[in-house]
Image: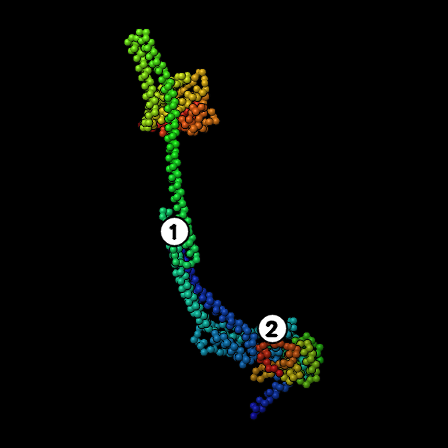
Amino acid sequence: MTNSLIRKFALIFWLLYIAVIPSLFLFIHYSVSSVLNDSEKAKIELLTQTLNPVISTYLTFDQRDMLSDTMHTFFQNPNILRVSLIDTNHHLIFEKHSSDSKTQETITISEPVIDVITHQTQGTLVISYANTFVRDLQYKLFMQLTLLSLLALLLFSITYWYFRNQIFILRQLSNWMGNFSLDKTIEPFRSSNTNTEIMTIIASANKMIEVIDDYRCQMEQINNELENRIESEIAQRREKEHLLIHQSRLAAMGEMIESIAHQWRQPLNIIGLAVADINMKRTLGLLKDNEIEKNSTIINNNLAFMSNTIDDFRNFFNTDKESLYFDPIQPIQEIFALLGEQLHYANITYHLHRKCDREIFGVVNEFKQVILNILNNAQDAIKTKQDRMGGAIDVTLHCDANHLYIDISDTGGGVPPAIFERIFEPYFTTKLHNKGTGIGLYMSKVIIEQHFEGMLSVSNTAKGALFRLTMALKES
Amino acid sequence: MKKILLLMLIPSLFWSATYDSTLLRIGAKLFPKVALMENGTKERIQSTLQFVIITTPSNRETAYRLAEMIEHQYGGVISHYLLALSIVSVKEALEIKNAHGFILLLDPDEDSLSPLLEHAHKNKILTFSFDPALLQKGTAISLYIGRSVKPYINLTTLKQIPFTFEYGFLKLSQPF
C-alpha cells in the first residue's frame, strides 16, 4: 500500500473504475434489457387493449374487411412480426406475418378478444414480436459506455499527470524545508509554477523560513550578549569575593593585632621590670652575675613568648591554600592560645570538649578564620552584656557517620529573633562605632558551605547563642 | 333462368316489410347490443334494459317470434343488466317513457309513426327497424343484410337527440 497521496488518488479511481464500469455493463445487459422487453410488451398489450373493443365490435357485426384493416394496424409497430385472430372454434379468422418473421427470435403473447357488451370470449388474438431492437439498443449503449469510459480514462490520465506534477513541486518544497538547519542560512525556494495555490504555499514557506532565520540570528546575538554578561557578572562577583575576603582578613588582622597587644602587655611588663631591676641593682652596686643571668633568663623567656606569638600570628595569616586532612582540635586550640589573654582580661572562661577524633578535609587557615570569627563574636557579645561574673565559651566536637559537628556556645544572651534571618548577610552588623564590618559571619558561611561542603547555622540556648558548624567527613 | 329470377327476387324480399327468420335473428342479437353501445342509454339504465316491440296487429306474430329470439339469445340478461321485453301497439307505446329501445315492426306509411318517433326522440329512446324506409321517417337505426350485416344510422336523428356511439360502431355503420 502506497503512502503517496496522488497514488492513493489513482488507486481509488481505478477501484471506482473497476467497480462502476462492469456494474454498468451488467446493469445494461440485465436490468435495462428486462425493462425494455417489459416496456415493449406493455406497448403491445396497450395496443391490443385499445384495438380489442373495435375488433370485438367488428366480430359482432362480422365485418371481415374492416377487421382486416384494423389488424393491419398492429404492423405499424415494426417489432410486431406476426398477428393472427382465432375464433372460439379454433378457426383462423385472420393471419398476417412479415417477411423476416422466421429469421428472427420472437416473443409471442396471446390475448382473448372479449365482447364488451356480453363479456363473452369471441376469439384469441396471437401476436409475435421480435426483441432484436433490445440487442441493438444494448449494443449502442455498450458502445457509448465504452467510449465514455475511455474518455473518462483519458481525462483521468491527463488530470493525474497534471496533479502529479503539482504535488511533485510540493514534495520538492517539503524536501527543501526538511533540509533547513538552524546552523546555516538557506536560499529561498524557487519554482516556475504559476498556479496561485502552489505559489501561495511556496511564498508562505519562504516567509516562514525567513522569519525562522531572523529569529535564529536574533537568538545568536542574544546568546552572545548573555555569555558576555555572564562572564562580566562572574568576573565582578569574583572581584567582589576577593574584596570581601581581603576585608575579612583585614578585620581579622585588626582583631589579631589587638590580641597580640594583650599577649605582649604582660611579657613587656616583665621585661621592663627585669631591665629596671638590673638598672637599680647596677646603680646600687648590687648587680651580680647571677642577678644578670636570672633577669636575662626572664627577658629571654618572655621574648621567646612574644616571638611565638608573632609566629602564631604569621601562621594565621599566611597565604597557604593547600587543602589537607587535619585534626580540627589543633587549630581551635591555637586560636584559643591567641585569644587566651584577651579572654582572661574580659573574665571569659572557655572549655573545649572533644567527643570525636575524626579529621576533616580543607584549608586549615580558612577553618581558623571561621573559628576566630565566631569566637570574637561570642567574646563581643559577652562583653556587651557587661556582666561582672564574666562569661563562658564552650566548644564541643562530636560526630556521626558522615558529619563532624562543632558547637560553639556562649553566654552572651543570644541572637535577637528579629535578626535571625539576616546575620549571615554580607555587611550586616549590630556592632556600634565601626567596630564591625558585617562580613565575618557571611565569609564564615561561605567558607563552610563551599570549601568544607558543610553548613553554618545558629540557634539560641538559655544563656546565649549556639553556632553549629556541620562539615562532611571524608575518607582520608 | 330460375337462378336469375331468384337473385332478382331476394333483394326485393329484403326491402319489403316481410320479416324472415334470419333477419329477425340478427336483429334479436344486435339491437340490444347496439343499445348498450350508445353512451347515453348505458348511463340511463338502472338495472333493467327495457326493450319495447311496437307492432301492428298484422305483425304481432312476427313480434312474438322476435321476442322469443331475443329471449333465446340473451336469456333475460345482457351485460349485467336484466333485459325486459314487451310487445305493444303504437297507442300504448306513446304512454311509455322509461324504455331504452323501440323496435318498430310498422309500415313506413303508418299514420301514427310520426308522433311515435317524436315521442321516442323526446324521451331519448333509441328506435330500431328492419326497414330502411323507416329511416327516412326518422328512425335512428336500421339493419342492412347483404354480404355482411351493416347497420344504417340516421345521422340527422342521432345529432338531433343526440345519441353518441363508440368509434367502432360508427366506423362500420352506413350513414343515411
The amino acid at mark 2 is: Ser
Q: In the rendered image, which quarter contains the C terminus of chain A?
A: top left
Q: Residue placed at 48% from the left, 69% from the top?
A: A36
Colour scheme = rainbow
Q: Position of residue B35 (x, y in %)?
A: 62, 76
Say if residue B65 shows up in the picture.
Answer: no
In the drawing, does residue A280 fall left or right of residue A114? left
Mark 1 vs mark 2: give the one in front.
1
Residue A62 quadrant? bottom right
Quickly name the residue at label 2. Answer: B79
Q: Residue placed at 57% from the left, 77% from the top?
A: B168
For disc 1, the chain is A
Q: Secondary structure at mark 1?
A: helix
Say above or below: A178 vs A55.
above
Instruction: Say which mark, if any, is on residue A177.
Output: 1
Say if residue B79 shows up in the picture.
Answer: yes
In the drawing, does residue B137 fall left or right of residue A115? right
For disc 2, the chain is B
Q: Position of residue A96 (x, y in %)?
A: 49, 78
Q: Secondary structure at mark 2?
A: loop
Task: In this rendered view, identify the residue nearer to me: A102 or A280.
Answer: A280
Question: Quick check: do tags 1 and 2 share a chain?
Answer: no
